[in-house]
Amino acid sequence: MSKAFVKESDHDDDEDLGAESVPLPAGTKNYMTTEGYKRLRAELAHLMNDERPSVVQVVSWAASNGDRSENGDYLYGKKRLREIDRRMRFLTKRLEIAEVVDPAAQPNKDQVFFGATVEYSDKKGETFRVTIVGVDEAEPLQGRISWISPVARALLKAREGDTVTLRTPAGVDELDILEVIYPGS
């Protein structure tokens, strides 16, 4: 097959990182919990030391088989290498600018700051429990929300018993803060 019919470029676009990349607001730091930092470092180490060398080995073997234009192992392996390299560059950049924050060292444990777990209720009386974490650690379905999310921004600096206003496209909601918890407290 001619290369003219293959829709692949020879260069990687660092900005095209898909859904895994959440841009940081301009002028802000990449705050991250200690656990989140360790998890990203472990992922980078796994990609660098385990996954990439095994894919390189497969690509090398596939390339030695001759015709590369119709060699699925070779074509898939090269694509996977580009994905791994792109993810490694992304992780390296994010870790370089990371500002690790230990929530357990927070002196004002009665107030909501980065790393706090907050239990709150809305106007309907529904109760929610969220932990405010870094952009790269957020897992909303597990109750881990980014510090730049609208809910986290509404909760930041509030105290137990406070009522804060959350503005959303659906309208304004009032959140009553029931409990503020930090790790190790």
Image (cartoon, rainbow, N blue to C red):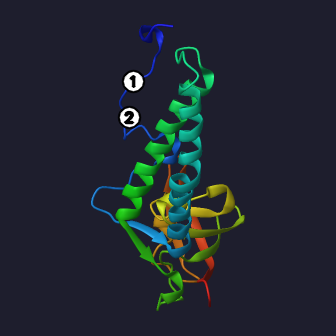
Say which mark, if any, is on residue 133.
none
In the rendered image, which residue does mark 1 sit on? 9
Give the vertical position of 64 relative to 14 (above or below).
above
Q: Secondary structure at mark 1?
A: loop
**Residue 73 left/right relative to 3:** right
Q: Name the kind of residue labelled 2 in the image.
A: Asp
Residue depicted at x 47% and y 78%: 113
CA–CA distance in space, label 2 to label 1:
7 Å
Within-10-Å neighbours for mark 1: few <14, some 14–19, many 20+: few
Q: Name the kind of residue labelled 1 in the image.
A: Ser
Q: Position of residue 13 (x, y in %)?
A: 37, 35
Q: Are marks 2 and 1 in contact (CB under 8 Å)?
A: no
Residue 107 visible in rendering: yes
Q: In terms of depth relative to the viewer, which is nearer, 180 or 123?
A: 180
Q: Position of residue 92 (x, y in %)?
A: 40, 57
**Residue 176 left/right relative to 95:** right
Within-10-Å neighbours for mark 2: few <14, some 14–19, many 20+: few
Quarter holding the C terminus is: bottom right
Residue depicted at x 27% and y 61%: 27
In the rendered image, which residue does mark 2 sit on? 12
- All told, the count of numbered labels is 2
